[in-house]
Image (cartoon, rainbow, N blue to C red):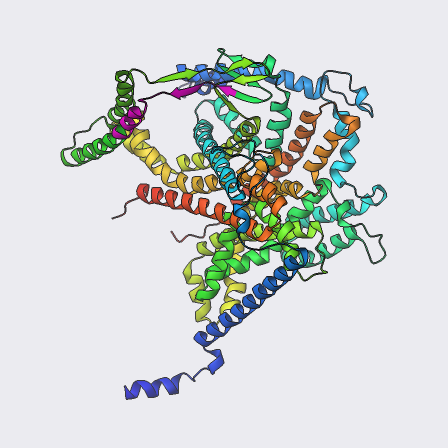
Amino acid sequence: MDNTFTPIEARKPPSSAIGPIAWMKESLFSSPVNTLLTVFFAYIIIRFIPPVLDWAFISANWVGTTQDECTKSGACWIFIKQWSGQLLYGSYPEELRWRVNLALIGLVAVVVMQFFLPQHLRRRVGWVSLLVYPLISIWLMYGGLGLETVSTDKWGGFSLNILLAFAGILMSLPIGIIWALGRQSQMPFVKVVCISSIELFRGVPLITILFMGSVMLPLFFPAGVQLDKLMRAFIAITLFQSAYMAEVIRGGLQAIPKGQVEAANSLGLGYWKTMRLIVLPQALKISIPNIVNTFIALFKDTTLVLIIGLFEILSTIQAALQNSNWLGGHHIEGYVFVAFVFWVFCYTMSRISVHIEQKLNTGHSRS
Amino acid sequence: MQTNKSKNSSATPKAAFYNRAEVRSVIFQVIVFLGLAYFFYTIYNNTMTNMEARGIRTGFGFMSQPAGFDILLSLIPFEATDSYGRTFFVGLLNTLLVSAISIVFATLLGFLVGVSRLSSNWLVAKVATVFVETFRNIPLLLQIFFWYFAVLATLPGVRDSISVADSIFVNVRGLSVPKIVWSDGASIVFYALLAAIAGAFFLSRWARKRQENTGQPFPTLWATLGLIIGLPLLTFLIAGSPASVEVPKLEGFGFKGGMTLIPELVALTVALSVYTAAFIAEAVRAGVQSVSHGQVEAAAALGLPHAKVLRFVTIPQALRVIVPPLNSQYQNLIKNSSLAMAIGYPDLVAVFMGSTLNQVGQAVEIVFMTMMVYLLINLTLSMFMNWYNARIKLVER
């Protein structure tokens, strides 16, 4: 007789507690109201999603070159295909578009390097690329020094959106840091100047600043000085973005415990050394997620330059919709395409921002 | 005193005059001041010379000259012979109109979506997430174009309007809805409403005081709602219903009677509301999530039913987190309403910075005025929201 105790095998939980049916009961039909909501939304999804998919993929027109070849009932993607060059590069000469490509690839490389380089090289490479890359890309885009010149009124399309957004963020970072430091300064006059600049440019719509750039700025310069349209838009965007950047950095500055400044002072560091070596590195680090968020906002706002007549992607679509060869009313295709492009970029960046936030969340509070 | 002085001079060698913090601060500020003064002086000089060279006048004299153009929508009577000054107010009122309507819709939709994202219903939460992630990652200008050129422009013509119950009509020219026409004696209903609001205010004060003193609760919400709705309704009926509903009717080429909302207004309102709602939803979600779980559990342990847990524990604490971002979203909405210009809705920027500036050419004055108006609106809103925030914030002992 074997006396060892052999436990019987544990019974599985009842099927009403696990598995898909239990999940559905729990998260879809837990109460009469929930059941009603589930049925309602399920109906909407079943009713509308298949026709949309059908329009966008199954009965869409993919092959061809002219409007007349859009014979099927779905979307006319030929329209987008034919205009894709304009949508990306504007009127940039076709045989020189490799220069824009090279500038964009360089941009991607600079950003990606920050994620994959070994830790000790990142900062050094970062600073160098921050200073050198803009010069190289301007040379590539504009020309001169052996390259054929392409005037800025030829620039356009989505590459202009990307360029404006990155140039804006790059220029607004130093101005924003100065304004944020000035706002916290002990010197009353400096403080007043910085607060009023920040509040002025943050409190008015970007359109009014763009207008200021396009109608007022030419009056500010001595006669004979000609600023081109892109430059004026860029100055306006920089002023606008700097105010937002200043507020983001102020948030970072305020999160740094006072003890850090006091410790630096007691070591004999002066104001600029305290800021440069102790406060700003910490403050900028915790501001990164919010800097990315303001970058997303700026990126979306670059579409506004269409109002002062620059040919970024949205105004290119508007122009394409008015083109006499494409008058068939392709509004939905055009807008859906541009929306999709922006969505992919902005969504990816917001994911990156969340990721950085989690990674940086090493704790600064003293609790 | 004597020892102190000698100690001072011997222990710390006196810093050189120019190295003292106060002196440096003054010198630095003087340099900044001189730099800015020179900067603005140069700009002023250049502007004056340039304007003279181009024959642009200065000053606000243009405000009283006749405008000579028509405006699509105006809340106050306006004709082409009215002054430029009046175009300013027409534009301003149109900006306030679209902002106010959009703020109401954006808040309602935003709270609904924000709460839905936290719903226990998987499908509802996912739909809300898709809504938020879609609309906040697409440029607002594109959304406005989409509603205006792709949706509203494809609606049927006036004669084939889509009608709801034969009183609301949707067509390519806009949205026609019934209008309430007040007749004589309607003002008494308005006074009754004012009286009811005042009464509700005092009633809720009395109820709060009584609860603080005796602990007896009072159904304040229902009582005040009943008062605010009941009293005007009663006076309305007693006064013999001094109002009638005017339903829009198709006559000839358009709708007569009722109220017609122009498609520009509809597209702008929809786009602004949906875009801002996506951001408000995120603020609401963050606010509700910030209330620690222990609070809800403690309230439940005290025996409060679900509705009261929400009303007395979750919402008051969540609101503290929600109100500051809500404030900045409202400000953003008002600023974003200036995108109206792109589809031709006659807001302040389109009318004043667009048409008026085109005709007058006095860029400095007009841009300055427009900027100041937006600053003023945002400042006022900010003050109100700060007041509200101070009212609901945590009272610490």
Seen in the picture, residue A362 relative to B16 is either above or below; the reply is above
Q: Residue at x 51, y 64 (%)?
A: A275
Seen in the picture, residue B346 relative to A235 is either above or below; the reply is above
**Magenta residues?**
B176-195
Q: B128 or A148: nearer the eye? A: A148
Q: A6 or B105: nearer the eye? A: B105
Q: B396 or A172: nearer the eye? A: A172
Tell me where residue A161 appears, x and y as whole percent. Answer: 68, 43
Q: Residue at x 64, y 50 (%)?
A: A215
Tell me where residue A336 appears, x and y as whole percent. Answer: 66, 28
Tell me where residue B268 appears, x and y as whole percent. Answer: 55, 31
Q: Residue at x 58, y 53 (%)?
A: B364
Asked whether the viewer can see residue B220, the reply is yes
Q: Residue at x 82, y 23 (%)?
A: A64
Question: Quadrant where the N terminus of chain A lies?
Answer: top left
Q: B151 or B187: nearer the eye? A: B187
Q: Is residue B186 located in the magenta-colored stretch of the structure?
A: yes
Tell me where residue A365 appears, x and y as whole percent. Answer: 42, 52
Q: How many discs mark residues in the rendered view?
A: 0
Q: Is residue B51 left or right of residue B62?
A: right
Picture quarter containing residue A330?
Answer: top right
Seen in the picture, residue B1 relative to A256 is either above or below; the reply is below
Picture quarter containing residue A315?
Answer: top right
Q: Is residue B364 left or right of residue A72?
A: left
Asked whether the viewer can see residue A29, the reply is no
- The residue most toward the top is B165
Q: Is residue B189 located in the magenta-colored stretch of the structure?
A: yes
